[in-house]
Image (tube, rainbow, N blue to C red):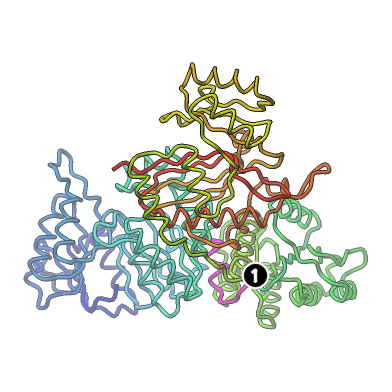
Amino acid sequence: MRPKSVALVGASPKEGSVGRGMITSTGMTGTPSKIYFVNPGYDEIDGQKCYKSLADLPEVVDMAVLGIANARLEAALDELIACGIGAATIFASGYLEDDAEPKLTERIARKAKAAGIAICGGNCMGFYHLDFGLRVCGFPPPDWIRKGNVAFITHSGSAFSALCHTDRRFGFTLAVSAGQELATDMAAYLDFALDIPATNVVGLFLETVRDPNGFKASLAKARAKGIPVVALKVGRTAESAALAVSHSGAVAGNHAAYRALFDHYGVIEVDNMDELVNALHLFSSERKLAPGGLATMHDSGGFRELVLDLGIENGVRFAKINEATRQKLAARLDYGLEPINPLDAWGTGNDWDGIFEDCLQALVDDPDTALATLCVEARDGYYLSGGYADVLRRVSAKSTKPVFYTTNVASNANLEVITRLAHDGVPVLSGVVSMLNVVKKAMAERDRAAQSEDHIAAAPAGLRSKWAARLATGNLSEADALDLLADYGVPVIAHLHADDLDGARQAAEKIGYPVVMKTAEPGILHKSDVGGVKLGIKDAAALETAYADLKTRLGAHVLLMPMAGKGTEISFGMTQDAQFGPIVMIGAGGVLIEMMPDRRFALPPFGPIEARRQIDQLSLRPLLDGKRGAKPADVGKLAQAFAAFSVMVGDLDGLIGEIDVNPLIVNEAGAVAVDALIVAISR
């Protein structure tokens, strides 16, 4: 990323070629590196000497840029290694027809790693380290590309071009097209970008993570530094994940695990390129969101209503302006306009710029405004567009809150009027729908960062060794699974085991009718599917009938427990992710699990504050507040149970492959698990 000298292998005078593109890119004003040309077909290019090989160079360069065909890559890398060059950028795909095993990309990766060589690529666009001054690309950047405070790291070359080559609002510290990551990956680039003092925000276009521990360490570093990370993860569907493998050899991974990872480290996950671009523009400012909601100002009543509809439907909180602010607005607005938020400020047009400035300033200054935007269209050479931009400049200069411009339509972002505004430090976002989504996510992360420090309980001493011995023998019975949960502080329903009818009678009498009887035969994981659950057994006669049926069909071993009380059914779950280890889940349970695909994923362990935050984001959350005369559930005890579950999962990492606790009954008395399936990791 900071080479003192660079060799362009395949440099060419031919216009439109990658070889010419490399020369143009590295030759742009401000390049601090010494640039050498290497191509056996030329003695000189543009009056500069061209060397026949890397070995002929007068010094050992820090990096070689390989702008050559796939068939020449391996020989070039071998020469690079022989010369002691420590880094390379590879544009070519590395795919050869009728290639031998191992494939060329794997051979290059092995050789580079063995020699300790860093590689950007292959199948990449290169990188721009504008904080340093170097541009390395086979497709030269536009002359307006500039240094700024955004770092962008992408697995997609087209995403690299979309931001670096077409959006003039951006200024970059670093932009990297990582490609196949043959030797250097996203985690390393992210770590490097975070150490550039000018970096205010990092954007990621992500197919996969090849170094999970390094990536987590870099995300932790970003959080410690207070630098927002915005991620667009592709491969979220099975079909897209399959394409990721064919595109770059990237295994997309379980998206639920990525959601948990991003949530754990405060990464702002976006869903599309519009949101990615808008989030990077918003967070490129050093200004942090204040407490409160969004204030928006418009020059159209219709668009004001549209933004309000879209915001409310999407759960965006609007600032509730106070009476003093309303009076300030009323004093400046033309007759007939309402002094409210969102605000339509266009009336007769008289003194429009003064009215807009005073009203926007009043909205920004309101104690409940976290950030404010003016939502209007723009066009070059139009007095209103220039005037709106000037209003934003003046209001922004008088506040420490984020103040930004939003176009109503996600239209061309390269108008001169808004490009200048962005360069002056006022973010410009495109399209109100995307803006509202980004603002909602920014508020959520603000609120999460402001929550009290969570207390993560230590796992009880000795329990890991106790249960490791039991899990080594195979999957747990339901009774053992419930006992394991109880050991770690997850409330479970009372349960007794019986091997014959007499034992079943004694257990039922001890518990008290009515009771539930379940098969406890080993190997039956889903009891309901085989008719292995008998509900509402009200007396000894019914017990005898139920037991006879289970014994005849499934076996003599049964489990008895009381009928659970009424309440909302919740489920806890856990799976092992190949990249990031154990992931815990909370969501709808029982019959709701089929009707309501509602769940949250998190990295364990965590405390009750984080557990409560996860619970509060469930769609079913209002059900816990009591409906139609039902008493509110004890959400605090549910949070304690989920936190205890996460501590258990963390303590038993490496021993358990899957957990399904479904349902937990949650009511005013608390939460109690009534069924559990725990699958040991096969040894």
Q: What's the residue type where badge 1 is placed?
A: Phe
Which quadrant is home to the N terminus?
A: bottom left
Front residue of 242 and 357:
242
Residue plotted at (31% across, 61% down): 185
Residue that extends furthest to the right in the rendered view of this protein: 335
Residue 477 position in % (x across, y down): 45, 37
Position above or below: 485 against 346: above
Q: Is residue 394 left or right of residue 134?
A: right
Q: Is residue 347 left or right of residue 372?
A: right
Residue plotted at (46% across, 45% down): 236
Q: Which residues are magenta?
A: 277-289
Residue 598 appears in the figure: no
Residue 25 position in % (x across, y down): 31, 68
Front residue of 663 and 563:
563
Q: Is residue 53 left or right of residue 322?
A: left
Residue 439 position in % (x across, y down): 63, 62
Q: Which residue is mark 1?
A: 404
Residue plotted at (68% across, 42% down): 568
* Residue 656 among magenta residues: no
Position above or below: 417 against 138: below
Front residue of 476 and 73:
476
Residue 75 position in % (x across, y down): 10, 56
Which quadrant is home to the C terminus?
A: top left
Residue plotted at (48% across, 39% down): 677
Residue 477 appears in the figure: yes
Position above or below: 110 against 626: below
* Residue 282 among magenta residues: yes
